[in-house]
Image (spheres, rainbow, N blue to C red):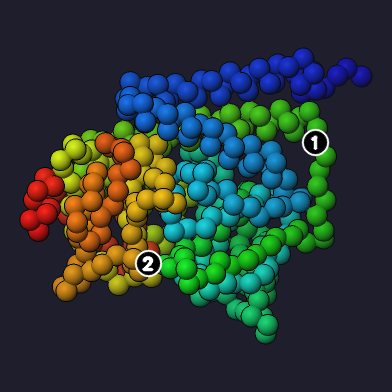
Amino acid sequence: MGIDPSEERIMNGEAWIGFCEAIQAAGETVLAQSAPDSPLDRAEGFRYLTRLLRMGLESQLEFSDPRAPVLYRNVHETVKLGADNPDNHYQTATVSGSYEYRLSGSPGTIHYLGIGTYSPGLDGRKTHGYLERNDLALEPDGSVVIHLSCERKPGNWLRMEPSTRTLLIRQTFLDRDAEEVAKLRIERVGGNEPAPLTAKRLERALKSTAAFVGGYARMFAGWAEEMRKRPNELPEFDPAAAAASGGDPNIRYYNGYWELAEDEALVIEVVPPDCDYWNIQLSNWWMESLDYRYFKIHLNKHTASLRKDGSVRIVVAHEDPGVENWLETTGHRLGTITLRWVGATEHPAPTTRVVTLGDIRAL
Protein backbone atom coordinates (compact mmCIF):
# COMPACT_ATOMS: atom_id res chain seq x y z
CA MET A 1 0.00 0.00 0.00
CA GLY A 2 1.42 3.41 -1.01
CA ILE A 3 1.82 6.30 1.36
CA ASP A 4 -1.21 8.58 1.79
CA PRO A 5 -0.81 11.84 -0.24
CA SER A 6 -1.32 13.97 2.90
CA GLU A 7 1.30 11.98 4.76
CA GLU A 8 3.70 12.43 1.88
CA ARG A 9 3.17 16.22 1.81
CA ILE A 10 3.70 16.40 5.58
CA MET A 11 6.77 14.16 5.43
CA ASN A 12 8.50 16.10 2.66
CA GLY A 13 7.48 19.53 4.00
CA GLU A 14 5.34 20.48 1.01
CA ALA A 15 2.29 21.17 3.20
CA TRP A 16 4.29 23.40 5.53
CA ILE A 17 5.94 25.31 2.68
CA GLY A 18 2.54 25.93 1.08
CA PHE A 19 1.21 27.20 4.40
CA CYS A 20 4.11 29.62 4.83
CA GLU A 21 3.75 30.91 1.28
CA ALA A 22 0.02 31.54 1.81
CA ILE A 23 0.69 33.46 5.03
CA GLN A 24 3.34 35.51 3.24
CA ALA A 25 0.83 36.29 0.48
CA ALA A 26 -1.62 37.61 3.09
CA GLY A 27 0.85 40.43 3.69
CA GLU A 28 -0.13 41.87 0.31
CA THR A 29 -3.28 43.21 1.99
CA VAL A 30 -1.17 45.26 4.40
CA LEU A 31 1.08 46.50 1.58
CA ALA A 32 -1.78 47.27 -0.83
CA GLN A 33 -1.83 50.72 -2.38
CA SER A 34 -5.30 51.34 -0.95
CA ALA A 35 -4.19 50.65 2.64
CA PRO A 36 -2.84 53.46 4.84
CA ASP A 37 0.94 53.68 4.74
CA SER A 38 1.89 55.36 8.01
CA PRO A 39 4.34 53.40 10.20
CA LEU A 40 1.61 52.95 12.85
CA ASP A 41 -1.04 51.64 10.45
CA ARG A 42 1.41 49.32 8.72
CA ALA A 43 2.76 47.98 12.00
CA GLU A 44 -0.77 47.33 13.19
CA GLY A 45 -1.54 45.65 9.87
CA PHE A 46 1.25 43.12 10.25
CA ARG A 47 0.40 42.61 13.92
CA TYR A 48 -3.18 42.03 12.79
CA LEU A 49 -1.99 39.15 10.59
CA THR A 50 -0.23 37.56 13.58
CA ARG A 51 -3.42 37.87 15.58
CA LEU A 52 -5.46 36.32 12.78
CA LEU A 53 -2.90 33.53 12.64
CA ARG A 54 -3.34 32.82 16.35
CA MET A 55 -7.10 32.90 15.98
CA GLY A 56 -7.00 30.69 12.90
CA LEU A 57 -4.73 28.04 14.43
CA GLU A 58 -6.94 27.82 17.50
CA SER A 59 -10.18 27.53 15.53
CA GLN A 60 -8.88 25.30 12.73
CA LEU A 61 -6.45 23.09 14.67
CA GLU A 62 -6.21 23.27 18.45
CA PHE A 63 -9.95 23.54 19.21
CA SER A 64 -11.37 22.13 15.99
CA ASP A 65 -12.61 18.71 17.08
CA PRO A 66 -16.43 18.59 17.37
CA ARG A 67 -16.17 15.22 19.15
CA ALA A 68 -14.41 16.92 22.07
CA PRO A 69 -15.57 20.56 22.01
CA VAL A 70 -13.84 23.29 24.04
CA LEU A 71 -15.50 26.61 24.86
CA TYR A 72 -12.80 29.27 24.68
CA ARG A 73 -12.35 33.03 24.22
CA ASN A 74 -11.63 33.57 20.54
CA VAL A 75 -11.76 37.40 20.50
CA HIS A 76 -10.30 39.43 23.35
CA GLU A 77 -7.85 42.19 24.23
CA THR A 78 -5.07 40.96 21.92
CA VAL A 79 -7.00 39.04 19.24
CA LYS A 80 -9.50 41.28 17.46
CA LEU A 81 -11.77 40.91 14.46
CA GLY A 82 -14.42 42.90 12.60
CA ALA A 83 -15.03 45.87 14.95
CA ASP A 84 -14.96 43.65 18.02
CA ASN A 85 -17.01 45.21 20.81
CA PRO A 86 -14.90 46.27 23.85
CA ASP A 87 -17.92 45.57 26.07
CA ASN A 88 -18.20 41.97 24.86
CA HIS A 89 -16.92 38.72 26.32
CA TYR A 90 -16.71 36.45 23.25
CA GLN A 91 -16.57 32.65 23.40
CA THR A 92 -16.82 29.96 20.75
CA ALA A 93 -16.66 26.20 20.28
CA THR A 94 -16.46 23.89 17.28
CA VAL A 95 -19.54 21.67 17.04
CA SER A 96 -21.18 19.48 14.40
CA GLY A 97 -24.77 18.84 13.45
CA SER A 98 -23.87 15.15 13.49
CA TYR A 99 -23.79 15.21 17.31
CA GLU A 100 -25.76 16.53 20.25
CA TYR A 101 -24.35 18.73 23.01
CA ARG A 102 -25.12 20.02 26.47
CA LEU A 103 -24.24 23.58 27.49
CA SER A 104 -24.55 24.23 31.21
CA GLY A 105 -23.41 26.42 34.08
CA SER A 106 -24.14 29.74 35.76
CA PRO A 107 -25.94 32.44 33.70
CA GLY A 108 -24.12 35.16 35.64
CA THR A 109 -25.44 38.70 36.00
CA ILE A 110 -24.03 40.22 32.81
CA HIS A 111 -26.36 42.63 31.04
CA TYR A 112 -26.74 40.72 27.77
CA LEU A 113 -26.24 37.06 26.91
CA GLY A 114 -26.71 35.77 23.36
CA ILE A 115 -25.97 32.22 22.19
CA GLY A 116 -26.05 31.17 18.53
CA THR A 117 -25.21 28.27 16.23
CA TYR A 118 -23.85 28.90 12.74
CA SER A 119 -22.56 27.37 9.56
CA PRO A 120 -19.12 28.67 8.53
CA GLY A 121 -17.90 30.55 5.50
CA LEU A 122 -16.05 33.73 4.60
CA ASP A 123 -18.68 34.39 1.95
CA GLY A 124 -21.53 34.19 4.42
CA ARG A 125 -22.33 32.69 7.82
CA LYS A 126 -25.86 31.43 8.33
CA THR A 127 -27.50 31.57 11.75
CA HIS A 128 -29.25 28.30 12.61
CA GLY A 129 -30.38 28.93 16.19
CA TYR A 130 -30.27 31.84 18.63
CA LEU A 131 -31.19 32.26 22.29
CA GLU A 132 -31.01 35.22 24.64
CA ARG A 133 -31.05 35.28 28.43
CA ASN A 134 -34.79 36.04 28.50
CA ASP A 135 -35.43 32.87 26.46
CA LEU A 136 -33.83 30.63 29.07
CA ALA A 137 -35.56 28.73 31.86
CA LEU A 138 -33.33 28.26 34.90
CA GLU A 139 -32.89 25.18 37.06
CA PRO A 140 -34.08 25.30 40.72
CA ASP A 141 -30.52 26.09 41.83
CA GLY A 142 -30.26 29.03 39.42
CA SER A 143 -28.08 27.25 36.88
CA VAL A 144 -28.94 26.81 33.22
CA VAL A 145 -28.90 23.79 30.90
CA ILE A 146 -29.20 24.17 27.11
CA HIS A 147 -29.52 21.32 24.63
CA LEU A 148 -27.91 21.71 21.20
CA SER A 149 -29.25 19.34 18.54
CA CYS A 150 -30.92 19.11 15.16
CA GLU A 151 -34.02 17.58 16.71
CA ARG A 152 -36.08 19.64 19.15
CA LYS A 153 -35.52 18.85 22.83
CA PRO A 154 -37.63 19.74 25.88
CA GLY A 155 -36.47 22.69 27.95
CA ASN A 156 -33.89 25.10 26.64
CA TRP A 157 -33.18 24.01 23.07
CA LEU A 158 -30.69 25.65 20.71
CA ARG A 159 -31.36 24.58 17.16
CA MET A 160 -28.63 23.04 15.03
CA GLU A 161 -28.68 21.87 11.42
CA PRO A 162 -26.56 19.21 9.71
CA SER A 163 -24.25 21.98 8.44
CA THR A 164 -23.80 23.64 11.87
CA ARG A 165 -20.12 23.97 12.75
CA THR A 166 -19.85 26.85 15.23
CA LEU A 167 -21.27 27.81 18.61
CA LEU A 168 -20.79 31.50 19.41
CA ILE A 169 -21.57 33.16 22.73
CA ARG A 170 -21.67 36.95 23.13
CA GLN A 171 -21.87 38.46 26.58
CA THR A 172 -22.16 42.23 26.84
CA PHE A 173 -21.30 44.39 29.84
CA LEU A 174 -22.90 47.66 30.73
CA ASP A 175 -20.80 47.99 33.87
CA ARG A 176 -17.78 45.66 34.09
CA ASP A 177 -17.27 46.49 37.77
CA ALA A 178 -20.75 45.34 38.79
CA GLU A 179 -21.57 42.45 36.46
CA GLU A 180 -20.40 38.83 36.31
CA VAL A 181 -20.06 36.83 33.10
CA ALA A 182 -21.95 33.59 32.58
CA LYS A 183 -19.69 30.63 33.36
CA LEU A 184 -20.64 27.90 30.91
CA ARG A 185 -19.15 24.60 29.77
CA ILE A 186 -19.95 22.38 26.81
CA GLU A 187 -19.89 18.60 26.51
CA ARG A 188 -20.87 16.19 23.77
CA VAL A 189 -23.78 13.93 24.66
CA GLY A 190 -22.35 10.44 24.99
CA GLY A 191 -18.96 11.69 26.14
CA ASN A 192 -16.05 13.50 24.58
CA GLU A 193 -13.89 11.38 22.28
CA PRO A 194 -10.99 13.49 20.97
CA ALA A 195 -9.60 12.38 17.63
CA PRO A 196 -5.83 11.85 17.40
CA LEU A 197 -3.79 14.12 15.16
CA THR A 198 -3.18 12.77 11.67
CA ALA A 199 -1.24 14.07 8.69
CA LYS A 200 -4.49 14.63 6.81
CA ARG A 201 -6.01 16.59 9.67
CA LEU A 202 -2.91 18.77 10.05
CA GLU A 203 -2.68 19.49 6.33
CA ARG A 204 -6.35 20.43 6.24
CA ALA A 205 -5.92 22.70 9.29
CA LEU A 206 -2.92 24.46 7.75
CA LYS A 207 -4.82 25.12 4.53
CA SER A 208 -7.95 26.39 6.31
CA THR A 209 -5.88 28.56 8.67
CA ALA A 210 -4.10 30.22 5.74
CA ALA A 211 -7.44 30.81 4.04
CA PHE A 212 -8.80 32.24 7.31
CA VAL A 213 -5.92 34.73 7.67
CA GLY A 214 -5.93 35.91 4.07
CA GLY A 215 -9.71 35.90 3.71
CA TYR A 216 -10.54 37.93 6.80
CA ALA A 217 -7.67 40.35 6.21
CA ARG A 218 -8.99 41.11 2.73
CA MET A 219 -12.64 41.21 3.76
CA PHE A 220 -12.37 43.80 6.53
CA ALA A 221 -9.82 45.88 4.64
CA GLY A 222 -12.39 45.89 1.82
CA TRP A 223 -15.05 47.11 4.23
CA ALA A 224 -12.79 49.94 5.38
CA GLU A 225 -12.02 50.89 1.79
CA GLU A 226 -15.75 51.06 1.03
CA MET A 227 -16.40 53.22 4.11
CA ARG A 228 -13.64 55.59 3.04
CA LYS A 229 -15.89 56.78 0.21
CA ARG A 230 -18.00 58.61 2.85
CA PRO A 231 -15.45 60.06 5.29
CA ASN A 232 -16.52 61.23 8.74
CA GLU A 233 -20.05 59.89 8.36
CA LEU A 234 -21.89 57.05 10.11
CA PRO A 235 -24.27 55.46 7.60
CA GLU A 236 -26.29 52.35 8.41
CA PHE A 237 -24.54 49.10 7.60
CA ASP A 238 -26.44 46.66 5.42
CA PRO A 239 -28.26 44.29 7.83
CA ALA A 240 -27.93 41.41 5.35
CA ALA A 241 -24.15 41.88 5.18
CA ALA A 242 -23.97 42.05 8.96
CA ALA A 243 -25.93 38.80 9.30
CA ALA A 244 -23.75 37.09 6.68
CA SER A 245 -20.61 37.96 8.66
CA GLY A 246 -22.04 36.47 11.86
CA GLY A 247 -23.46 39.65 13.39
CA ASP A 248 -25.98 39.41 16.21
CA PRO A 249 -29.48 39.40 14.63
CA ASN A 250 -30.73 41.81 17.31
CA ILE A 251 -28.17 44.51 16.46
CA ARG A 252 -28.45 47.35 13.96
CA TYR A 253 -25.00 48.59 12.99
CA TYR A 254 -23.73 51.96 11.75
CA ASN A 255 -20.18 51.80 10.37
CA GLY A 256 -18.03 54.66 9.18
CA TYR A 257 -14.54 55.90 8.40
CA TRP A 258 -12.96 58.87 10.15
CA GLU A 259 -9.91 60.95 9.26
CA LEU A 260 -8.96 64.07 11.20
CA ALA A 261 -6.21 66.68 11.08
CA GLU A 262 -4.41 67.51 14.33
CA ASP A 263 -6.69 70.50 15.06
CA GLU A 264 -9.94 68.81 14.03
CA ALA A 265 -12.63 66.90 15.89
CA LEU A 266 -15.55 64.76 14.76
CA VAL A 267 -18.83 65.58 16.51
CA ILE A 268 -21.48 62.84 16.52
CA GLU A 269 -24.98 63.57 17.79
CA VAL A 270 -28.04 61.36 18.15
CA VAL A 271 -30.99 60.66 20.44
CA PRO A 272 -30.49 57.05 21.58
CA PRO A 273 -33.66 54.97 21.19
CA ASP A 274 -35.24 52.86 23.87
CA CYS A 275 -33.12 49.71 23.64
CA ASP A 276 -31.40 46.99 25.66
CA TYR A 277 -27.96 48.39 24.95
CA TRP A 278 -26.05 50.71 22.67
CA ASN A 279 -22.42 51.59 22.22
CA ILE A 280 -20.03 53.47 19.99
CA GLN A 281 -16.34 52.66 19.48
CA LEU A 282 -13.24 53.61 17.54
CA SER A 283 -11.27 51.03 15.57
CA ASN A 284 -8.23 51.14 13.34
CA TRP A 285 -8.19 50.68 9.54
CA TRP A 286 -8.12 46.90 10.03
CA MET A 287 -11.34 47.14 12.06
CA GLU A 288 -9.69 46.17 15.33
CA SER A 289 -11.01 48.07 18.34
CA LEU A 290 -8.40 50.50 19.64
CA ASP A 291 -6.73 49.54 22.91
CA TYR A 292 -9.58 49.85 25.40
CA ARG A 293 -7.38 48.51 28.21
CA TYR A 294 -5.61 51.84 28.51
CA PHE A 295 -7.61 54.43 26.56
CA LYS A 296 -11.18 55.69 26.42
CA ILE A 297 -12.13 54.58 22.92
CA HIS A 298 -15.76 53.58 23.48
CA LEU A 299 -18.94 54.56 25.29
CA ASN A 300 -22.14 52.71 26.02
CA LYS A 301 -25.61 53.23 27.42
CA HIS A 302 -24.24 53.22 30.96
CA THR A 303 -21.02 55.22 30.55
CA ALA A 304 -22.15 58.00 28.17
CA SER A 305 -23.45 61.33 29.50
CA LEU A 306 -26.77 62.42 27.99
CA ARG A 307 -28.00 65.97 27.61
CA LYS A 308 -31.27 67.21 29.13
CA ASP A 309 -33.18 66.56 25.92
CA GLY A 310 -32.09 62.89 25.91
CA SER A 311 -29.55 63.32 23.15
CA VAL A 312 -25.87 62.47 23.30
CA ARG A 313 -22.95 64.37 21.81
CA ILE A 314 -19.77 62.34 21.25
CA VAL A 315 -16.49 64.00 20.31
CA VAL A 316 -13.64 62.18 18.54
CA ALA A 317 -10.39 64.11 18.83
CA HIS A 318 -6.63 63.60 19.07
CA GLU A 319 -6.45 65.47 22.39
CA ASP A 320 -8.85 66.08 25.25
CA PRO A 321 -11.08 69.03 24.28
CA GLY A 322 -12.40 69.31 27.83
CA VAL A 323 -15.94 68.11 27.08
CA GLU A 324 -17.98 65.07 28.01
CA ASN A 325 -17.98 61.89 25.91
CA TRP A 326 -14.52 62.34 24.39
CA LEU A 327 -13.15 59.36 22.47
CA GLU A 328 -9.36 59.15 22.10
CA THR A 329 -7.74 58.44 18.74
CA THR A 330 -4.63 57.00 20.49
CA GLY A 331 -2.19 58.39 17.93
CA HIS A 332 -4.20 57.40 14.85
CA ARG A 333 -5.00 59.98 12.19
CA LEU A 334 -7.65 57.73 10.62
CA GLY A 335 -9.66 54.63 11.34
CA THR A 336 -13.15 53.15 11.44
CA ILE A 337 -16.03 53.70 13.83
CA THR A 338 -19.03 51.57 14.80
CA LEU A 339 -22.32 52.40 16.51
CA ARG A 340 -24.69 49.64 17.65
CA TRP A 341 -28.35 49.71 18.67
CA VAL A 342 -29.24 46.41 20.37
CA GLY A 343 -32.86 45.34 20.78
CA ALA A 344 -34.21 48.69 19.56
CA THR A 345 -37.55 49.13 17.79
CA GLU A 346 -36.29 52.36 16.20
CA HIS A 347 -32.89 52.96 14.65
CA PRO A 348 -32.10 56.68 14.49
CA ALA A 349 -29.21 57.69 12.26
CA PRO A 350 -26.56 59.87 13.93
CA THR A 351 -25.51 63.22 12.49
CA THR A 352 -21.81 64.03 12.10
CA ARG A 353 -19.72 67.13 11.45
CA VAL A 354 -16.04 68.01 11.52
CA VAL A 355 -15.10 71.10 13.51
CA THR A 356 -11.93 72.63 14.93
CA LEU A 357 -10.85 72.02 18.50
CA GLY A 358 -11.47 75.70 19.13
CA ASP A 359 -15.10 75.27 18.09
CA ILE A 360 -15.43 72.32 20.47
CA ARG A 361 -14.07 74.29 23.40
CA ALA A 362 -16.50 77.10 22.57
CA LEU A 363 -19.40 74.65 22.97
Residue holding disc 2: 277
Disc 2 versus disc 1: distance between alpha carbons? 43 Å
Q: Would residue 311 appear left or right of 119 to someone viewing this image?
A: left
Q: Quadrant of the N terminus?
A: top right
- At which x and y percent is residue 327? 28, 52
- At which x and y percent is residue 140? 67, 85
- Name the amino acid type tagged 1: Leu
Q: Would residue 170 appear left or right of 307 to someone viewing this image?
A: right
Residue 251 disc label: none
* Label located before the other in sequence (2 or 1): 1
Would residue 257 be visible to someone looking at this image? yes
**Label 2, residues with CA under 10 Å away: few <14, some 14-19, many ≥20:** many
Would residue 233 be visible to someone looking at this image? no
- At which x and y percent is residue 316? 24, 49
- Would you place residue 260 above or below residue 132 in this image? above
- At which x and y percent is residue 147? 68, 67
- Would you place residue 173 above or below residue 124 in this image? below
- Would you place residue 185 above or below residue 140 in this image? above
**Label 1, residues with CA under 10 Å away: few <14, some 14-19, many ≥20:** few
Residue holding disc 1: 197
Viewer-closest of 118 and 211: 211
SS at mark 1 in the image: loop
Residue drawn at x 80%, y 22% as measured from the top left: 7
Residue drawn at x 16%, y 73% as measured from the top left: 309
Residue 278: quarter of image: bottom left
Viewer-closest of 327 and 161: 327
Residue drawn at x 53%, y 48% as measured from the top left: 75
Q: Quadrant of the C terminus?
A: bottom left
- Name the amino acid type tagged 2: Tyr
Viewer-closest of 109 and 119: 109
